[in-house]
């Protein structure tokens, strides 16, 4: 097979597998996994292994940890997205973002009050909630400040990993009941247009939510990845709004009040609003727009040699399914379609991958996501033109990684700007 007849940088997986019946002489496709494989000299067949235990453990060399950006009650810890496999985030490394610390709530005393513009104001215990028909939904939750990092105000270094840049993102299987079921139970009055979601934390987190979301896909969930929700994620129950910004998905949910207008709380006026260039502000900007990030190669990895590598990453959109991801290795001059790894689910992280033949020269790697609505992930210049520089939220612009001639991979700050 003559490689010069194919683009020297990128080619499809199908082409790779088709060549020579799937065996390509002299070509090794290297990935993050097989590039760092370490083989133990110990023969495990010669030694009896350890016995069963009440709680399983990760392998000693597979210790995933969050990066704690601010260890305060109003801080956050970031998921190591570059180290994950598949699309599900293990519950213990799901990102955290708090406004008043993590409350301790006993399940026996938990209650959810639904009142306001309803026929029958009611309180539900946790046991009451679990009696309703249960549903499970796999979807991402992302902090609306994900990717900010003081980006254009304080500046950030090129030595920033995917975890430090976009680690306020995680995907879980959530289990609970549809919020619409509870609203039918209490009898929502016809004039109700909004509901207030209030949490039990010290910040008493409150957000106004359009009632249409309740009739669509909103849930009250108490399960995460096959077990009870972790306290950091809202135990014993939280609001789930698939595809919407994380702060609106109120944790430790204790009260839902229905009204004919929004409540204009602190968290949706002085916070979580987007100042615009025309001196107005974008309020209730709930939906997380399409976004993607290359997780390999990325900082701090160093490519040890030229040759075939597999570019890998995540794409996601709060508007629905990702239908295409395009990758560039020359700073956006040329774009090539990546393969999407199944399953491809709505409002869920989706993996993408594409082979790349690195020639040893400086390269700029980028990715852009397209969702089923036709929305295309913008450049920073495109985003700034519409949103200006005044916001701290919804930075979904194209990310870039700079591969130096010595193989070092750094965040491409100038290339993103």
Image (cartoon, rainbow, N blue to C red):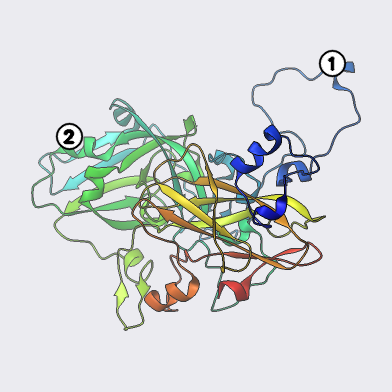
In the rendered image, which quarter contains the C terminus?
A: bottom right
- Please report contact status of discs 2 and 1: CB closer than 8 Å, yes or no: no
- Mark in the foreground, 2 or 1: 1
Q: Residues within 10 Å of mark 1 (few under 14, many from 20)?
A: few
Q: Residues within 10 Å of mark 2 (few under 14, many from 20)?
A: some
Q: Badge 1 is on which residue? A: 48
Question: In this rendering, would 283 be left or right of 344?
Answer: left
Q: In the depicted view, which residue is nearer to us: 87 or 119?
A: 87
Residue 238: quarter of image:
top left
Residue sitting at 12 percent across and 39 percent down? 187
Q: In the depicted view, which residue is nearer to us: 17 or 403?
A: 17
Q: Badge 2 is on which residue? A: 185
Residue sitting at 38 percent across and 68 percent down? 271
Numbered disc total: 2
Residue sitting at 76 percent across and 41 percent down? 34
Q: Position of residue 181 (x, y in %)?
A: 22, 35
Q: Position of residue 58 (x, y in %)?
A: 70, 33
In the rendered image, which quarter contains the N terminus?
A: top right
Which numbered circle lies on residue 252? none
Residue 80 shows in the view: no
Task: Indicate the secondary structure of the residue bearing disc 2.
Answer: helix
Residue sitting at 86 percent across and 17 percent down? 45
Q: Position of residue 306 (x, y in %)?
A: 79, 56
Q: Could you give the CA–CA distance between mark 2 and mark 1, rounded to whole angstroms?
A: 57 Å
Question: In this rendering, would 295 be left or right of 44?
Answer: left
Please report whichever mark, 2 or 1, sits nearer to the chain's N-terminal start.
1
Residue 165 shows in the view: yes
Residue 51: quarter of image:
top right
Task: Indicate the secondary structure of the residue bearing disc 1.
Answer: loop
- In the rendered image, the vertical position of residue 61 relative to residue 299, given as above or below: above
């Amino acid at each position: 097979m003559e490689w010069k007849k194919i683009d020297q940088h990128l080619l499809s997986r199908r082409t790779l597998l088709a060549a020579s019946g799937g065996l390509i002489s002299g070509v090794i496709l290297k990935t993050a996994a097989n590039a760092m494989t370490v083989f133990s000299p110990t023969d495990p067949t010669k030694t009896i292994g350890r016995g069963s235990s009440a709680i399983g453990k990760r392998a000693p060399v597979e210790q995933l940890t969050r990066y704690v950006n601010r260890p305060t009650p109003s801080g956050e810890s970031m998921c190591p997205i570059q180290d994950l496999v598949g699309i599900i985030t293990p519950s213990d490394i799901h990102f955290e973002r708090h406004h008043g610390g993590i409350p301790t709530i006993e399940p026996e005393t938990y209650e959810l009050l639904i009142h306001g513009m309803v026929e029958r104001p009611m309180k539900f215990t946790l046991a009451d909630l679990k009696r309703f028909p249960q549903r499970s939904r796999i979807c991402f939750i992302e902090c609306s400040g994900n990717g900010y990092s003081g980006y254009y105000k304080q500046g950030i270094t090129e030595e920033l990993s995917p975890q430090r840049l976009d680690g306020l993102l995680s995907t879980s299987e959530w289990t609970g009941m549809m919020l619409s079921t509870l609203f039918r139970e209490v009898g929502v009055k016809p004039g109700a247009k909004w509901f207030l979601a209030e949490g039990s934390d010290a910040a008493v987190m409150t957000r106004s939510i359009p009632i249409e979301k309740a009739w669509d896909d909103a849930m009250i969930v108490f399960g995460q990845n096959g077990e009870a929700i972790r306290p950091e994620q809202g135990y014993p129950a939280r609001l789930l709004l698939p595809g919407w910004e994380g702060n609106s998905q109120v944790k430790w949910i204790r009260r839902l009040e229905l009204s004919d207008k929004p409540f204009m709380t602190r968290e949706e006026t002085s916070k979580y609003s987007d100042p615009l260039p025309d001196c107005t502000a974008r309020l209730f900007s709930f939906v997380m727009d399409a976004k993607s990030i290359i997780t390999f190669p990325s900082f701090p990895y160093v490519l040890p040699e030229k040759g075939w590598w597999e570019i890998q990453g995540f794409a996601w959109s709060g508007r629905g399914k990702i239908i295409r991801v395009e990758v560039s290795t020359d700073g956006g001059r040329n774009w090539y379609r990546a393969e999407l790894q199944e399953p491809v689910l709505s409002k869920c992280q989706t993996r993408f991958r594409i082979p790349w033949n690195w020639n040893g020269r400086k390269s700029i790697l980028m990715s852009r996501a397209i969702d089923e609505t036709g929305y295309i992930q913008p450049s920073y210049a495109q985003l700034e033109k519409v949103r200006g520089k005044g916001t701290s939220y919804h930075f979904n612009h194209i990310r870039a990684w700079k591969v130096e001639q010595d193989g070092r991979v750094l965040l491409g700050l100038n290339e993103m700007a």
